[in-house]
Amino acid sequence: MSERNNEHPVQETLRVTMDEIRGMVDANTIIGRPIQCSNDTTVIPISKVSFGFASGGSDLPTKVAKDMFGGGGGAGVSISPIAFLVIMPNDVKLLQLSVNASTPNAIVNMVPDVMDKVTGFLAERQEKKAKAAAEAE
């Protein structure tokens, strides 16, 4: 046992490993800092963060009265950008990166853009009809 607070050395190993992970992963890693662009547009990156850690140790047999402990720990972090939140003066869009997107997800993500284009097309067509009717009179 460690002399410090009567805790086992493996507890200190776990504590250090978790403190290091905490230092690597914070809210700014997941929701990135806003990027100001021209024409009053702001882009905010959004990432997926995965992490894992392992730690372990063992008391070693010894003839010496002092504690003999061997241990270690390790951690891994994966950060993948998954989307960008684009804030424009009159609109907000979520642009997902679809590197590994399934077909249903890709279709659902395209629906708002398709609806905007169809609505624009129909409005343009109606405008042309109204203009033609006005000219005919």
Image (cartoon, helix red, strand yellow):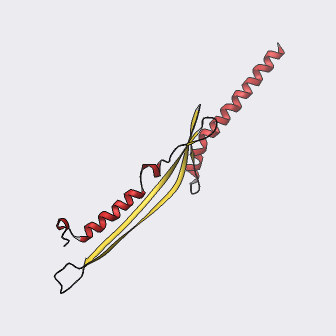
Measured as percent of width and height from the top left, residue 107 is found at 59, 47
Horizontal side of 64 relative to 127 (left or right) equals left
Q: Position of residue 43 (x, y in %)?
A: 56, 43
Quadrant in which the N terminus is drawn? bottom left
Question: Is residue 89 shown left or right of residue 18?
Answer: right
- At x 21%, y 70%, the residue is 8
Residue at the image point whose x is 66% and y is 31% from the top: 119
Q: How many marks?
A: 0
> Relative to 99, does residue 4 appear above or below in the rendering?
below
Rendered residue at 42%/61% (across/down): 51
Q: Is 87 situated left or right of 50 in this image? A: right
**Foreground pick, 73 / 132:** 73
The residue depicted at 57 percent of the width and 57 percent of the height is 100
Q: Nearer the viewer, residue 29 or 137?
A: 29
Foreground of the two, 44 or 35: 35
Which residue sits furthest right? 136
Q: From the image, which quarter does the C terminus lie in? A: top right
Figure check: 136 above or below 26 = above
Residue at the extreme bottom: 63
Q: Quadrant of residue 6?
A: bottom left
